[in-house]
Amino acid sequence: MRIDVVTIFPEYLEPLNVSLVGKARTRGTLDVRVHDLREWTHDRHNTVDDTPYGGGPGMVMKPDVWGEALDAVAASGEGEGEGAPALVVPTPSGRPFTQELAVELAAKPWLVFAPARYEGIDRRVIDDYATRWEVHEVSIGDYVLAGGEAAVLVITEAVARLLPGVLGNAESHRDDSFAPGAMADLLEGPVYTKPPVWRERGIPEVLLSGHHGRIARWRRDEAFRRTAAHRPDLIERCDPAAFDKHDRALLAELGWEPGPDGRFGRAAGAVEE
Ligand code: 6GU
């Protein structure tokens, strides 16, 4: 996979040299190219922004600079046989970034990221490229960052670990919290390693039992407890057909009950843990 990032802070993308993404680059699985947007400015001050039409606070990134930059990046890939890249525009007003979208993006041969600073990029840039390229405006969560670069790091890491050969252990994907078809979309429970006692804390007995059935059951229970506590919306959204008798008993114990449609919800009068 090829990834291009156009930014006014190339140094912000340095973490892409490290760890999993860095290794994928070294091994040639991932070809990452970071570009300084200011290379495509023509004035003495390398201006990338201007005041917003209609007034208001902040500045807006200029369409002409972005247009030249994206055209140049696209042209640099001509002859590589990939066709047009998918353009990913990180923005708090984008569609939520999910594991499902990570899987979708991981299947693309070529991504171009256009992280904005200031109040964002002139709308006409996205509208223009959307006539020729696949465009994804993506938000990484319900909070506001000063720019899209951190989102590029997040999205790139989530995508890179899905590329064939990057994680090493194919099993590692299957149980990812949020992996489509993971433990019925439950959060993962706690994990333990040696030593068996640390600061007088032992580990749950069942994990030492060698009884694979009981261990799987315990892990599933812990996943339910954690999901119910941190992400009740995930339980509410679950197809109750995915729950066995034991799951239902545990949910009842945690203060959940099936509604008229069979989906589970917080029982009336249930107390927060
Ligand atoms: Cl993608 N960009 C910015 N600036 N803020 C965000 C975001 C993106 N996702 C959540 N907040």
Image (tube, rainbow, N blue to C red):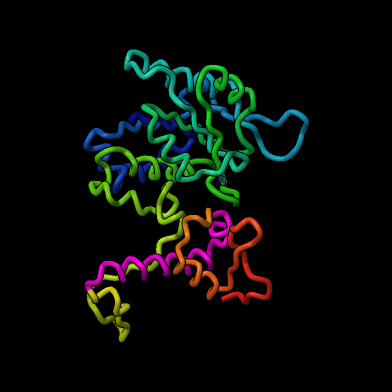
The answer to which of 181 and 56 lies nearer the viewer is 181
Q: Which residue is drawn at 60% across and 43% down?
A: 92
The answer to which of 191 and 205 lies nearer the viewer is 205
Q: Please tell me whether residue 233 is drawn above or below residue 204 in the rendered image.
A: above
Q: Position of residue 267 (x, y in %)?
A: 64, 70
Query: Is 53 left, or right, of 127 in this rendering?
Result: right
Q: Please tell me whether residue 57 is drawn above or below residue 80 in the rendered image.
A: below
The quarter of the rendering in which ligand 1 is drawn is top right
Residue 247 can be seen, yes or no: yes
Q: Main secondary structure of the magenta part?
A: helix
Q: Where is residue 122 in the image (x, y as percent from the top left)?
A: 63, 27
The magenta stretch is 210-238
Q: In which quarter of the image is the C terminus?
A: bottom right
Q: Does the magenta stretch include residue 94?
A: no
Residue 43 can be seen, yes or no: no
Q: State the count of labels.
A: 0
Q: Please tell me whether residue 21 is drawn above or below residue 37 in the rendered image.
A: below
Query: Is 141 left, or right, of 209 in this rendering?
Result: right
Quadrant of the rendered image containing residue 83? top left
Q: Residue at x 50, y 21 (%)?
A: 133
Q: Is residue 235 magenta?
A: yes
Residue that lies at the very extreme toward the top in this rendered image: 79
